[in-house]
């Protein structure tokens, strides 16, 4: 498997923001060296951990809508995973996923749980 997941954010304004693919972002990604391939991950019958990062510009106030859900589809799959809550350390599960003011982006799949590849 290789590539970027398809990511959308369901907003309280009843619209959906679609993520732009980026190789490297503030929270993770892979080397930006020109022409460097993105990681290829082998799929086997054994479970393994792969990850990617999602980020967006947040804000404050009534101008920007809230994120109600995140929809994720992995490369080559038709299945959509929808998250409507998240775990926040020290708080527990919360339905508040943030305020969306633009620039939704997603990095490629990488091996491991960090979201960052070399």
Image (cartoon, rainbow, N blue to C red):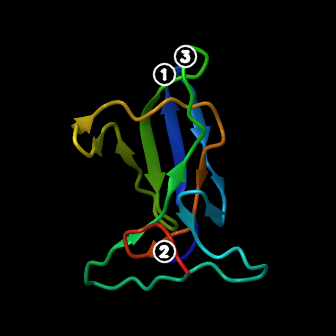
Sequence-wise, the earlier of marks 3 and 1 is: 1
Asked whether 20 or 90 is in front, the reply is 90
Name the residue at 47% across, 62% down: 74
The residue pinned by badge 1 equals: 12
Is residue 30 placed above or below 70 in the rendered structure?
below
Q: Decide: is 49 above or below 107.
A: below
Point 38% across, 75% down: residue: 112
Residue 14 x %, y %: 53, 22
**Separation of disc 3 and disc 1 at Cα?**
13 Å
- Residue 41 vertical position relative to residue 24 in the rendered view, above or below: below
Report x, y in % for residue 108: 56, 67
Q: From mark 2 to mark 1, how far is it between C-alphas?
A: 31 Å
Q: Give the residue pinned by disc 3.
A: 61
In the rendered view, would you say 66 is above or below 78? above
Does residue 11 appear left or right of residue 34 in this picture? left
Position of residue 58 measured from the top left corner of the image (x, y, whole percent): 56, 34
Residue placed under numbered mark 2 in the picture: 110
């Amino acid at each position: 498997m290789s590539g970027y997941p398809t990511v959308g954010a369901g907003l309280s304004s009843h619209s959906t923001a679609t993520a732009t693919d980026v190789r490297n972002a503030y929270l993770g990604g892979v080397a930006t060296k020109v022409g460097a391939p993105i990681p290829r991950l082998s799929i086997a019958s054994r479970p393994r951990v792969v990850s990617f990062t999602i980020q967006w510009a947040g804000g404050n106030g009534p101008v920007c809508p809230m994120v109600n859900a995140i929809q994720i589809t992995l490369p080559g799959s038709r299945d959509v995973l929808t998250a409507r809550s998240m775990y926040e350390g020290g708080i527990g599960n919360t339905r508040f996923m943030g305020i969306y003011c633009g620039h939704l982006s997603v990095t490629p799949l990488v091996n491991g749980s960090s979201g960052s590849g070399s």
